[in-house]
Image (tube, rainbow, N blue to C red):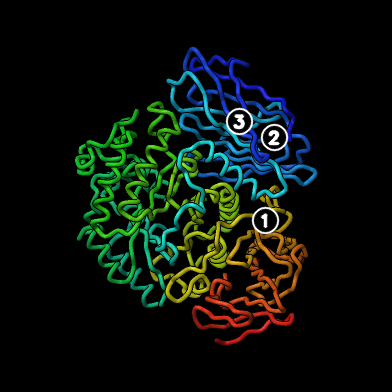
């Protein structure tokens, strides 16, 4: 374990900090320790820093990775060896000791309090516990989970399950949630294609392009700027950053689509796309629009009984459970009546900005997410994408929705950003993936990172959708990801880094970065080069890199070179990537009775193209080049 030198203290609203008046107690079950706060005061606790539990150094610590909220909405990893360097707003701390053991500190969000970690200047770290509510005189409830063991992935699974058992909030783990059927097909999003110029005509032209190129897109997200936002037409901007600033300061005038770019209304536009074989999802922020509703506007008139005015005068949904539900129900009544099939709800990590001091953080988040999910459940069968919602108060209070974005926005034609994107998605998924399937965001099929992004989409386990501009979609980039009907060849869970990559500093890597996943009884490993110096990097891959892969001997097939190696479970294969544009994709299939079916060689997740297998008799979902290994040799057969 770690050195049991722990100090607890409280800080009041007036700024007084008192040691030892605060206390905590622990409960241990199956080598998992839960820490509970138990602090009381005669004056209100500081809403931003109500209680602290200070932990001393961890015995035998070698190095760690932590995941912290670097902005209001998004998280990213940080690697270190000294606990004092842990960034504030850390939402998990995974460490490795010199004996190879892993350990996990996992802060949680209870009804009244949110916990995050931060390093102490003199060493060790603090579990910082706060409510964003200045009327509480006590801090009571589950704060933190700690566990150690050899398997880092099991640590996450067990810690989250145990925390949810103790919290008794009804929040589900990922395996208890239902993945939306429609989002198992290929999709497209209007944002990077059109941004503020999105229109009915442009959307129709893009869907006609898919049809002409035989790209089996089955759904489209009508993203930001479809609504009537009147401030936008009065604003001046010269750059993308200025455009975003205008949008974030704007309000929604009407529930209906913008009358200039959608002259026939939202329902007409959706029907036009439906007639082209595309189902439509609608993007909305939690607050109607980025800064709420336009005072006195049509949306405000429709929703006036279900809103409040925040401390800055913005009109946003009421946090009262019934009123909040009616806000979303009324909005979703309209979207459903227009023919929308699902929603993407953005701007979710906004509790502190809009609702501070109205109620404790956990209660506010639960009220808002329950309202959203209840309405989405009744209108869209629960089909939604959660976005800009990686704050722990969101993660720990969504009860049922199955998909959540796990990175900052995609930036086209940007190789340095691509490396950061891979790392954000991978390490954020370690915790988000316990609750949700992770959305690795949209991408372009014709930019310099398209090949790499297509492999990421293949292994990520979440939805696959692109945001190509008009006339720029490349079908050859998408065909390895789907069957001919558009159904994606999807891995079974979120993709995680391999165990030997977890605490390696990939801001300054000297080795390849590996992602791993499962598809049926087979494994998948993708290897990437993330060193900005663009020098050759080496490493190894092994069947043992894939968490929960069962078997003794495996056929390890590299997709792009069409080569195969037979490896025992713990054997390693050395590989080299020459530069940042070099990557590899390995399919790892159990080799039994001198036989291993790889699947269709044209597809990335080739085992998912196999419909049935009895011995060496294999049935495929569709025709193509069938790859298999028999008696140690690789064969290709046209089917």
Q: Marks 2 and 3: in contact by CB < 8 Å?
A: no
Q: The C terminus is located in which quarter?
A: bottom right
Q: What's the residue at 61%, 26% (across, down)?
A: 25
Q: Which residue is mark 1?
A: 498
Left or right, 198 with respect to 461, comes to left
| Earlier sequence position, callout 2 versus callout 1 | 2
Q: What's the residue at 32%, 69% (across, down)?
A: 205
Q: Judge depth for marks 2 and 1 and give the one in front.
A: 1
Alpha-carbon distance for marks 2 and 1? 23 Å
Residue 259: name its quadrant: bottom left
Question: Does the image show residue 448?
Answer: no
Q: The N terminus is located in which quarter?
A: top right
Alpha-carbon distance for marks 3 and 1? 29 Å
Q: Which residue is mark 2?
A: 83
> Element under label 1?
loop
| Earlier sequence position, callout 3 versus callout 2 | 3
> Element under label 3?
strand
Q: Which residue is mark 3?
A: 35
Q: Within 10 angstroms of label 2, few (less than 14), some, or many (20 or more) residues? A: many
Residue 67: name its quadrant: top right
In the rendering, at what x and y percent does residue 128 appear?
57, 29
């Amino acid at each position: 374990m770690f050195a049991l030198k722990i100090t607890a203290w409280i800080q009041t609203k007036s700024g007084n900090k008192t040691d030892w008046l605060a206390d905590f107690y622990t409960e241990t079950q199956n080598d998992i320790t839960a820490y509970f706060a138990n602090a009381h005061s005669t004056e209100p606790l500081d809403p931003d820093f109500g209680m602290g539990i200070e932990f001393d150094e961890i015995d035998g610590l070698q190095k760690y990775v932590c995941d912290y909220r670097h902005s209001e909405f998004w998280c990213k990893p940080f690697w270190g060896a000294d606990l004092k360097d842990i960034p504030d707003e850390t939402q998990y701390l995974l460490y490795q000791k010199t004996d190879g053991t892993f350990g996990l500190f996992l802060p949680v969000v209870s009804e009244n309090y949110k916990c995050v970690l931060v390093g102490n200047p003199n060493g060790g770290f603090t579990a910082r516990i706060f409510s964003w509510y200045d009327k509480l005189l006590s801090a009571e409830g589950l704060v933190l989970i700690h566990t150690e063991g050899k398997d880092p992935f099991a640590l996450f699974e067990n810690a989250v399950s145990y925390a949810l058992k103790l919290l008794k909030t009804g929040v589900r783990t990922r395996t208890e949630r239902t993945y939306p059927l429609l989002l198992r097909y290929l999709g497209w999003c209007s944002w990077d294609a059109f941004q503020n110029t999105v229109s009915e005509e442009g959307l129709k032209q893009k869907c006609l392009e898919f049809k002409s190129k035989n790209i089996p897109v089955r759904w489209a997200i009508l993203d930001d700027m479809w609504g009537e936002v009147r401030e936008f037409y009065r604003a001046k901007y010269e750059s993308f950053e200025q455009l975003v600033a205008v949008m974030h300061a704007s309000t929604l005038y009407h529930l209906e689509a913008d009358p200039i770019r959608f002259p026939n209304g939202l329902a007409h536009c959706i029907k036009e796309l439906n007639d082209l074989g595309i189902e439509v999802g609608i993007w909305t922020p939690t607050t109607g629009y980025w800064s709420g509703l336009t005072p006195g506007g049509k949306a405000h008139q429709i929703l006036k009984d279900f809103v409040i005015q925040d401390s800055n005068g913005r009109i946003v949904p009421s946090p009262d459970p019934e009123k909040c539900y009616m806000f979303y129900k009324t909005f979703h009544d309209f979207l459903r009546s227009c023919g929308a099939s699902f929603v993407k709800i953005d701007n979710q990590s906004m509790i502190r900005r809009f609702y501070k001091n109205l109620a404790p953080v956990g209660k506010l988040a639960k009220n808002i997410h329950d309202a959203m999910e209840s309405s989405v459940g009744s209108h869209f069968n629960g089909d939604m994408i959660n976005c800009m919602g990686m704050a722990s108060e969101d993660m720990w209070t969504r009860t049922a929705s199955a998909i959540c974005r796990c990175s900052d926005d995609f930036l086209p034609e940007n190789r340095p950003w691509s490396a950061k994107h891979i790392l954000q998605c991978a390490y954020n998924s370690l915790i988000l993936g316990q609750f949700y399937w992770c959305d690795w965001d949209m991408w372009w099929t014709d930019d310099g990172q398209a090949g790499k992004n297509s492999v990421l989409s293949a292994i990520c386990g979440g939805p696959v959708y692109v945001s190509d501009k008009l006339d720029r979609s490349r079908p050859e980039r998408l065909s390895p990801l789907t069957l001919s009907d558009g159904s994606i060849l999807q891995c079974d869970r979120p993709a995680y880094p391999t165990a030997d990559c977890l605490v390696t500093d990939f801001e300054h890597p000297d080795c390849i970065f590996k992602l791993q996943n499962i598809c049926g009884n087979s494994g998948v490993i993708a290897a990437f080069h993330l060193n900005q110096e663009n020098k050759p990097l080496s490493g190894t891959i092994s069947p043992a890199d894939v968490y929960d892969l069962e078997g003794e001997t495996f056929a390890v097939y590299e997709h792009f070179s069409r080569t195969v190696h037979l490896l025992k479970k713990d054997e390693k294969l050395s590989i080299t990537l020459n530069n940042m544009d070099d990557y590899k994709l390995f399919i790892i299939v159990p080799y039994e009775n001198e036989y291993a079916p790889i699947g269709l060689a044209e597809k990335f997740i080739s085992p998912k193209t196999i419909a049935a297998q009895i011995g060496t008799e294999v049935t495929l979902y569709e025709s193509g080049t069938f790859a298999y290994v028999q008696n140690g040799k690789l064969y290709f057969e046209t089917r």
